[in-house]
Image (tube, grey):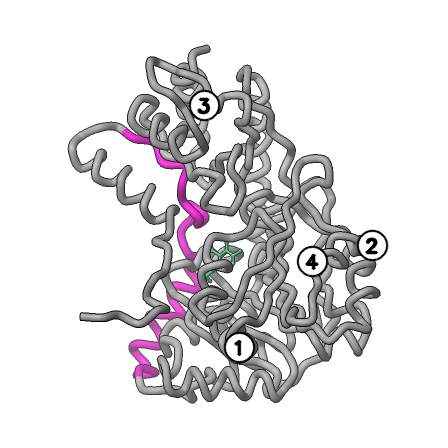
Amino acid sequence: MKLAKRSAIEPSLTLAMNSKAKEMKAKGVDVISFAAGEPDFNTPAHVKEAGKRAIDDNKTYYTPASGIPELKMAVAKKLERENGLKYTAANISINSGAKHSVFNVLSVLVDEKDEVIVPAPYWVSYSEMVRILGGKPVFIATDEKSGFKITTRDLEKAVTERTKVFLMNSPNNPTGAVYTKEELYDLARWLEEKDIVIVSDEIYEKILYDGFTHTSIASYSEKIKRKTVIVNGVSKAFSMTGWRIGYAAGPVPLIEAVNRLQGHATGNPSSIAQWASLVALTEDAGFIEEWVGEFKKRRDYIVGALNGIPGISCTVPRGAFYVFPNVQKLLSRTIGGEKIEDSMSLANYLLERGRISVVPGIAFGQDGYIRISFATSMENITEGMRRLKEAVGF
Ligand SMILES: Cc1ncc(COP(=O)(O)O)c(C=O)c1O
């Protein structure tokens, strides 16, 4: 059987690490996983109740393919209340998770050979999505020196006649970098005159530390808003990863195209999850502050612990729930009789010898780093950091 060219997709290394860890666990090995990309809190009770109510009330039929009007309105109100952006329901598409939103949006924007600028390290799926669509991801490498952030100078160098989209993500997975309002507005000022669509993935907007606040690049000016698509969802802020609800907000013609695509490809996102998300977005969400407080305690501990291990240095993430320590000094060395060539072999070594699973930096387009999620208990973090230190020989 001859498969289409677009089937040549790289498997997700995050998922691969996860399944390897699961295999070991199934064999009785006590593995601590730091590979998860989801909060370890349960979905709040009132949201779960809303889901159950939706079933009992028979809200189990097809909904409009682009989502229920009530949820679109709730998203529009959220964007006005929290991000200072005015949209109507016609500007909103409800999708099956923010991942689906990004894919839908890129699908209606990217033609063969179109270029999509992606600051690296980047979330694993961006590059593969662009490739599936026949586009070309153009990466801008960042490191600790710039706080893992890009400037207009970097954009200037990356832009060509074929640049179609600038795909950004703040707060960032995997680095935890958060652009300040000034930094974002600098980018916006430069982008205002360019024929480039900005896709802004803001899924971690609520998970922020140290007084950092979230700004949406679309708030810079009407002109920028007209060329920006915001992607967000309920997965990370409300601990609803399995419910699969995300959304895109942007100019009407683009949203209509997304809705047409969705109408043929998947139809509506789960009706039950939509009704539960409506409650998540409209009722009191004070619990998020508590969750962020808990994440911060873990972040402080893990950053301190990592910086105490010779050969590892870790910057302080200002958002999301990952650390992205630099492990370059551990590479090209022999540890425990094994040659550690790159972040992949380090991750494998840590899994096999240290019984901890992390994601290699190469999964995010940047070798020399590993991603450790602190969306796990303090107990796991303490024991995991002890294992890491021991495994690398200290
Ligand atoms: C940057 C980023 N965008 C989008 C997503 C996907 O979110 P969802 O679970 O809503 O599809 C993730 C999940 O890991 C993410 O890290």
The answer for how far apart the CA atoms under marks 2 and 4 are is: 21 Å
Q: Earlier in the sequence, mark 4 or mark 1?
A: 1
Q: Position of residue 288 (x, y in %)?
A: 56, 52
Residue 36 among those drawn in magenta = yes
| SS state under label 2 | helix
Q: Is mark 3 within 8 Å of ligand 1?
A: no
Q: Toward the viewer: 77 or 200? A: 200
Residue at numbered disc 2 = 182
Amino acid at circle 2: Glu
At a point 80% along the width and 68% down the height, the residue shown is: 220
* Residue 158 circle label: 4
Quadrant where the N terminus is found in the figure: bottom left
Between marks 3 and 2, how big is the CA–CA gap? 36 Å
Tag 3 and tag 1, C-beta contact below 8 Å: no
Position in image of residue 128 (x %, y %): 45, 60
Of residues 5 and 214, the one drawn nearer to the viewer in this rendering: 5
Q: Residue at x 35, y 69 (%)?
A: 5
Q: Which residue position is annotated with label 1? A: 111
* First to last magenta residue range: 31-60
Residue with the mark numbered 3 = 385
- Helix, strand or loop status at disc 1: loop
Q: Count the marks.
A: 4
User: Looking at the image, is mark 2 or mark 1 nearer the viewer?
Assistant: 1
Residue at mark 1: C-beta within 8 A of ligand 1 = no
